Image (tube, grey):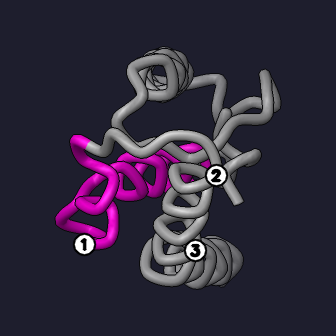
Amino acid sequence: VFGVACFAGLELCEFDPFDSHQAHVVKQIKAAFDDATAGASPPCGPRLSALLRLALETGKSARDGRSCRAIGKLRGQTASGVALAELRQEVATAVQATVLEPSVVRAAESFRALDA
């Protein structure tokens, strides 16, 4: 599920909303997006801008326990091995249903609006 975000295909990793490396990658992508959309005539067009903005919002929501309560199950976990991998998969599945899938719907709506 979260091979997507380790985020630019840099590596395949298990979903861990509390991992500082994953958070750092999202922060770097946000900084690049801010640079690409700044100024009077940004080099990034409206379609790419909308896609990147939605991806960043989704990445932030996918790490936020207020967006998906299942994320709280991973906070402070000391499980290891198979138990931790299973818990991460359970939480990733919940995040996919409550955060990612609605984001795909919003993306489709955004692009329909841009095409209108």
Magenta span: predominant SS is helix
Task: Residue at 65%, 23% (x, y): give it.
Answer: 43
Q: In the rendered image of this protein, does residue 24 appear above or below residue 5? A: above
Disc on res. 69: 1
Residue 72 x/y as whole percent? 23, 60
The answer to whether residue 87 is left or right of residue 82 is left
Give above or below for 68 relative to 2: below
- State left or right for residue 8 relative to residue 108: right
Which residues, given as a range, are shown in magenta? 49-76
Helix, strand or loop at mark 3: helix
Q: Residues within 10 Å of mark 1 (few under 14, many from 20)?
A: few
Left or right, 88 with respect to 76, comes to: right
The residue beneath circle 2 is 82
Q: Nearer the viewer, residue 9 or 89?
A: 89
Q: Residue at x 46, y 57 (%)?
A: 58
Residue at 79% across / 26% down in the picture?
Answer: 11
* Residue at the far left in the pictured view: 66
Q: Give residue 69's position: percent from left, percent from top.
A: 24, 72
Kindly report the distance in space between the C-alpha atoms of the residues bearing marks 1 and 2: 22 Å
- CA separation in Å, label 3 and label 1: 12 Å
